[in-house]
Image: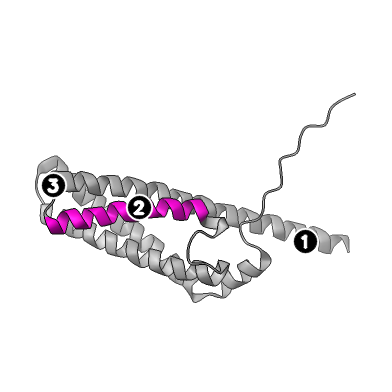
Amino acid sequence: MSIPAPQPAARRPLYTPEERKRRDASGWTLVQGLLAPVQFMVFLVSLGLVLRYLATGEGHTAAAASVVIKTLTLYAIMITGCIWEKVVFGRYLFAPAFYWEDVFSMLVLALHTAYLVALFTDAFGARQQMYLALAAYATYAINATQFLLKLRAARLDQARQDRALAATGAAA
């Protein structure tokens, strides 16, 4: 007699049907979809400028300005993301579907803000400020990956739901 293999526990889809409808109907979804790649491009340019400064000692003003711009884009996406989360899930932060992404986002915000404080108070030296920027950027890269994985999970959930709906329709 063979023992059946254990089945993986069914996980809750990222969005309920109602949440998916609110997500798809919200203009904030488009705002997030536009801001995310803009922020990523700003990140890449800034990262290059920060690394150039650290490697050559040249271009501090451009590197520092780029980190400020990156931080402002981060604030913009965080504020609009909170509004989006309220529209879709009924709370501004820490909705169960995005809880860990939001927790890690707080670290990202804290490090970017610490950079601004260091820059505008002239705390640390220029190199140390750039290392702080790199720490902020490392957390941003992790957080962006978290959100990309969530986006992929949402697409897989939708594909499963579409297949189940098609199978139900075909059976009828």
Which amino acid lies under the numbered mark 1 shown in the image of this protein? Ala
Q: Which mark is residue 124?
A: 3
Nearer to me, 32 or 133: 133
Q: Give the residue pinned by disc 1.
A: 166
The reply to whether residue 105 is visible in this rendering is yes
Give the image location of residue 140, x and y in percent: 36, 51
Give the mark nearer the N terminus: 2 vs 1: 2
Give the image location of residue 130, x and y in percent: 19, 47
Residue 77 sits above or below residue 125 on the image: below
The boundaries of the magenta stretch are 99-121
Relative side of 11 to 68, left or right = right
Q: Determine the CA span between mark 3 and mark 1.
A: 60 Å
Q: Is residue 63 magenta?
A: no
Q: Determine the CA span between mark 3 and mark 2.
A: 20 Å
Q: Give the residue pinned by disc 2.
A: 108
- Local packing at callout 2 (Cα closer than 10 Å; few below 14, some 14-19, many 20+) is many
Q: Determine the CA span between mark 2 and mark 1.
A: 41 Å
Residue 154 sits above or below residue 56 on the image: below
Give the image location of residue 103, x and y in percent: 44, 52
